[in-house]
Image (tube, rainbow, N blue to C red):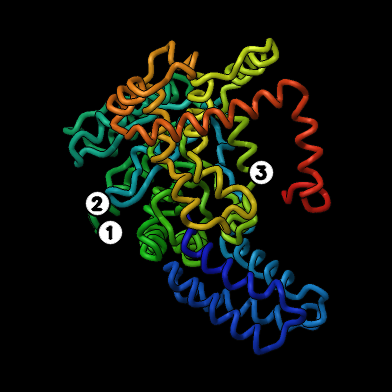
Amino acid sequence: MFAQLQDRLNGILKQLRGQGRLTEDNIKDTLREIRLALLEADVALPVVRQFIEDIRAKAVGEAVMKSLTPGQVLIKLVHDELVRVMGEFNERLDLNTPPPAVILMAGLQGSGKTTTAAKLARWLQEKHKRSVMLASCDIYRPAAIEQLRILAAEVGAEYCPSQAQEDPVAIAQRALDTARRRFKDVLIIDTAGRMHVDAEMMAEIKRIHTAVQPIETLFVVDAMTGQDAANTAKAFNEALPLTGVILTKTDGDARGGAALSIRCITGKPIKFLGTGERTAMLEPFYPDRIASRILGMGDVVSLVEEVQARVDREQAERLVKKLKKGKEFDLADFKEQLEQMARLGGVLGLMERLPGMNQLPDHIKAKASDKELAKLIAIINSMTPQERRFPAIIKGSRKRRIAAGSGTRVQDVNQLLKQFMQMQRLMKRMQGGGMAKMMRALQGRLPPGGLPL
């Protein structure tokens, strides 16, 4: 998300870094470029106007104009304004109520409500150790009820069965009674969506809301609809007392207009981002971290949290013990590392959270695509256990067989083996206490204070 806006803003602000002082003219030019960048990112016009006016008012102040690093000060103003527009801080779910706390999911058809309900159940169970029940009131969309049943089993949440012939309000009431009897902490209710906001849909969801009195009513919206997402959220908010928004499909949204518009237009906070199709790909929305990503400062805090949550520690410890015993790093180990990277959102997902990575050339980013990662794993999967343990035996005929089995070319197999050998050499250096030497050598090339966190 934000790739387009990130590229534009970084190009604009990069020009300021080298300037000795700010003048009203270069501030005016910069703000005009920022305005165009926001409009291209499909940010709502009223939000853009307010954004630019607020920065202009602060930028022409004496403290900024006389600063020794005026370009950096203006960059900080842009960062702070991005944070303000998106909501200052992360607003958590309010579950402070006698159990079960009811969460009602609302939104248009195709926004990803059903998948998001399951993602939220998984997040509550894993992060907050809450017992969760899922229920579907979507009696209109074919297989919607069955989809939620399958997803509930996948995430390990209890499921309250329902039938397409039942009344949605009756389903919601029965689910609430069942959740009480089963002593569930949280009940998540998935509701029906429509292709557009209509009176019939609004009347039905109002009746469900009245029947179960949810403590959280979350509007689920597709980020790729841009500022239309904010306008739809506003329409829902006028009919329902929304408590927050979940932006889905952010991995496919290069603009980010929805994230920058929703808070200002609806007054409701974005609470979560859906970052992919898998049920593990839901993350809390932190405005300050997102603002840092947009300006190319990275998001190391989120990266560390994700590594702690998703990296298989036992697997990592096994690799460390293996290397300590003097055994060689092999292709099976290499495959495990690639799979760990995939679980963390792929190469690009990692890169966008590291400071300065947005400045890499496009051809480098293309080589680091998630398709390349999947291709490497496919090539290793096409090898025999012996070939993975002893890569040196992989010669001509074996390479051709591996390439045919993985749907790739012999050149791709050669490239993988080259990358593996580089990784193997790195691991050997680390075995002999080389890590400390490497860090000492690297330290001289880092900015004062180490890595820019």
How far, Cα to Cα, is label 3 from label 1?
A: 38 Å
Image spot of residue 216 (x, y percent) = 48, 44
Circle 1 crowding by C-alpha within 10 Å: few under 14, some 14–19, many from 20: some
Give the labeled residue for mark 3: 301
Which of the two marks, 3 or 1, is nearer to us in this view?
A: 3
Task: Please identify the quarter of the rendering in which residue 112 is found.
Answer: top left
Q: Secondary structure at mark 2?
A: loop
Image spot of residue 299 (x, y percent) = 62, 49
Q: Residue at x 59, y 37 (%)?
A: 96
Q: Residue at x 50, y 51 (%)?
A: 364
Judge by depth and name the residue closer to the eye, 429 or 296.
429
Give the labeled residue for mark 1: 197
Look at the numbered discs 3 and 2 and tell me whether their residues touch, using CB distance below 8 Å.
no
Q: Secondary structure at mark 3?
A: helix
Q: Residue at x 58, y 66 (%)?
A: 10
Q: Amino acid at mark 2?
A: Arg
Circle 3 crowding by C-alpha within 10 Å: few under 14, some 14–19, many from 20: few
Look at the numbered discs 2 and 1 and tell me whether their residues touch, using CB distance below 8 Å.
yes
Give the labeled residue for mark 2: 194
